[in-house]
């Protein structure tokens, strides 16, 4: 990050020991893991305070530093996180992992039990705190609700889990309920969704790359379709 934009997590100083690895998948219950790629989460020093840079509040600041304001859309990852964490899928305990990878190469692990702020302003404040402190703990315990972890993200994924990238530009369009049913109710699938304003995900760890509509969808809408298909397969109402 440019010096004038302040301090945030250094990818070389991320949390986690060398013993970190894939989560224990000892039970037979199927689940899902979401990875939100290319999220715009960048803290900058605007005036005397650090703020999460976004196109609405910091367009002049960004242009001054020769940045394109249209690329600074943290609202996209905020909406995507709410779509995942609010879903019946998560409340039924089927969300086995949630990660956010920023466009500045910072990897964030999100505890499925966290309650993300509903308002964008409070969300921005929480993200600035995370990028500076590297972790956020629960107020009533020692559990870490958010933390910056070591890369690559594949070290945190269960062995054998199918990794599926989602994009409108993917070579094939699938009927999602049939697609997830083909993997079976006891499998764990990793869905990788772009959380940026423009472009497509570029991840070299994918097993498949699909589209779920003939039309471009927002990240939150795409996630809603994934959750609905999985909830149908698992009988979650």
Image (cartoon, helix red, strand yellow):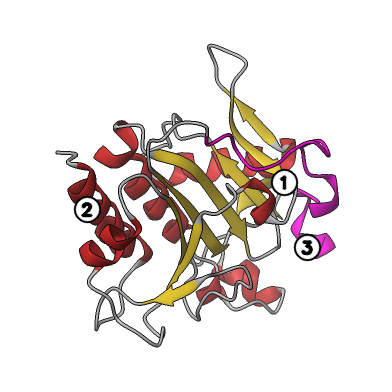
x, y (%) of residue 191?
Answer: 44, 59
- Cα separation, mark 2 vs mark 1, equals 44 Å
Dominant secondary structure of the residues highlighted in magenta in the image: loop
Mark 1 vs mark 3: which is more N-terminal? 3
- The numbered dot on residue 228 is 2
Location of the N terminus by quadrant is: bottom right
Q: Label 3: which residue?
A: 1
* Residue 227 belongs to magenta span: no
Out of 154 and 40, give the one closest to the viewer.
154
Which stretch appears magenta?
1-25
Q: Where is residue 46 shown, x and y percent of the image? A: 67, 54
Asked if the residue at tag 1 contacts the one at tag 2, i.e. Cβ–Cβ closer than 8 Å, the answer is: no
Taking the spot 73% from the left edge, 35% from the top edge, the residue there is 133
Real-space Cα distance between discs 2 and 3?
Answer: 38 Å
- Residue at (27%, 76%) from the top-left corner? 174
| Label 1: which secondary element | loop
Residue 39 appears in view: no
Closer mark to the observer between disc 2 and disc 1? 2
Q: Of the residues tagged 1 and 3, which is closer to the observer?
A: 3
Is 63 placed above or below 181 here?
below
Q: In this view, does 20 lie above or below 140?
A: below
Out of 177 and 183, give the one closest to the viewer.
Answer: 183
Tell me where residue 179 appears, x and y as whole percent: 29, 66
> For the view shown, which residue lies furthest in the left direction?
237
At which x and y percent is residue 25?
A: 52, 36
Residue displayed at 60% across by 42% down: 109
The image's mark for residue 48 is 1
**4, 214: nearer the viewer:** 214
Above or below, 174 relative to 28: below
Disc 3 is placed on an element classified as: loop
């Amino acid at each position: 990050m440019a010096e004038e934009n302040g301090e945030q997590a250094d990818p070389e100083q991320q949390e986690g020991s060398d013993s970190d690895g894939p989560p224990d998948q000892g039970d037979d219950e199927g689940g899902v893991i979401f990875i939100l790629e290319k999220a715009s989460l960048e803290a900058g020093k605007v005036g005397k305070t650090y703020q999460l840079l976004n196109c609405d509040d910091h367009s002049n600041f960004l242009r001054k530093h020769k940045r394109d304001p249209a690329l600074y859309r943290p609202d996209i990852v905020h909406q995507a996180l709410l779509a995942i964490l609010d879903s019946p899928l998560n409340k039924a305990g089927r969300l086995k992992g949630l990660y956010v990878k920023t466009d500045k190469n910072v990897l964030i692990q999100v505890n499925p039990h966290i309650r993300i702020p509903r308002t964008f302003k409070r969300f921005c404040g929480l993200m600035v705190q995370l990028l500076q402190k590297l972790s956020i703990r629960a107020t009533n315990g020692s559990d870490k609700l958010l933390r910056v972890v070591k890369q690559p993200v594949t070290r945190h994924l269960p062995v054998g889990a199918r990794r599926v990238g989602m994009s409108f530009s993917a070579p094939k369009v699938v009927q999602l309920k049939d697609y997830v049913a083909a993997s079976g109710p006891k499998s764990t699938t990793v869905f990788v969704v772009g959380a940026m304003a423009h472009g497509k995900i570029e991840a070299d760890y994918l097993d498949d790359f699909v589209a779920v509509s003939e039309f471009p969808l927002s990240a939150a809408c795409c996630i809603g379709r994934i959750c609905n298909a999985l909830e149908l397969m698992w009988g979650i109402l």
